[in-house]
Amino acid sequence: MNFALIMLVLLLVTGAVWLAESLYFRKHRADGEQQPWWIEYPASFFPVILVVFVLRSFLVEPFKIPSGSMLPTLLVGDFILVNKFTYGIRLPVVNTRLIAVNEPQRGEVMVFRYPENPALDYIKRVVGLPGDEIVYSNKRLTINGREVPLKADGEFNYLEGGLNFVATSRFQEQLGEHTHSVLVQAAVPPVQLSGVQRFPFRENCAYNESGFRCKVPAGHYFLMGDNRDSSSDSRYWGFVPEQNIVGKAFLIWWNFDNLKRIGNSIN
């Protein structure tokens, strides 16, 4: 469901009724005559819809985390806020950037439109910028010939789907200025070769049993989940075009199961 499109339609309909009421109907209504319901309700809702539309389109938009691909940074059920202004001002619905503000940086957590189905929003961490060479071999990440710092940080266990117990090793990884946790399952290969799809600029990548090597094309980004062995990301469906960017995730504002997470920043 394209919520932005629904909001735009509601805004146009209620705005048209509000404008017609202000410019025509009010002047031609007898003194003391009440507004008909089909004018009263849309005209009353128009200011509220306008404020929500502007906030969601240009400033901040809420999202809910549906899967464990970003564990342990983000938990299933986290409600997060995404800064829509960080990467530039974009036209609602079509998502075309009008004014550039900042470019995505390595290590930032980004919400974007899934390239295979732009109606879906995904969230991953920015690993590769345009022009970067990304190598992921034997669970170690290298960017432009430099191995990304990685430090062991104990274990992290969780239930997947409420039934499957998953045991992982936790590491502290540093991408750019961002230090964050990643999870690795030793028994799982760096990439499931059977899951790699045919995607635009697939020729920029080479895969083998130990991992892959990719050259990020201009205007695109390479993103991966922090839960490295349980994440559908750029390893499988390719690069994220600039026009698919939604915004930068920056805050957890609610979690029904863990109130201590409320107000935590997203690193």
Image: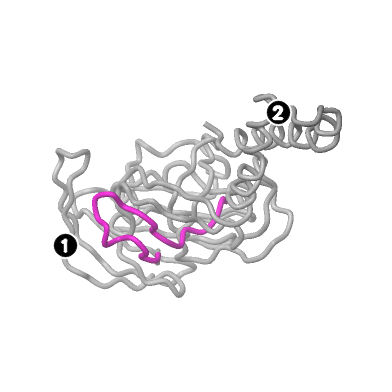
Q: What residue type is labelled 2?
A: Gln
Disc 1 designates what residue?
Answer: 155
Tag 1 secondary structure: strand
Rendered residue at 61%/37% (across/down): 7
Labels in figure, total? 2
**Badge 2 density bin: few <14, some 14–19, many ≥20, Cα 10 Å:** few
Query: Does residue 125 lie above or below 93 as drawn?
Result: below
Determine whether 192 is above or below 138 in the image: above
Looking at the picture, which amino acid does disc 1 mark? Glu
- Closer-to-camera residue (189/263): 263
Query: Mark 2 — residue?
Result: 34
Residue furthest to the front in view is: 32
Q: How crowded is mark 1: few (under 14 residues within 10 Å), some or many (20 or more)?
A: few
Q: Give the range drawn in magenta.
A: 245-265
C-alpha gap between disc 1 and disc 2: 67 Å
Residue 27 falls in image quadrant: top right
The foreground one among 53 and 29 is 29
Element at badge 2?
Answer: loop
User: Percent position (x, y) of residue 79?
Assistant: 38, 51
Residue 203: x and y in percent read 54, 45
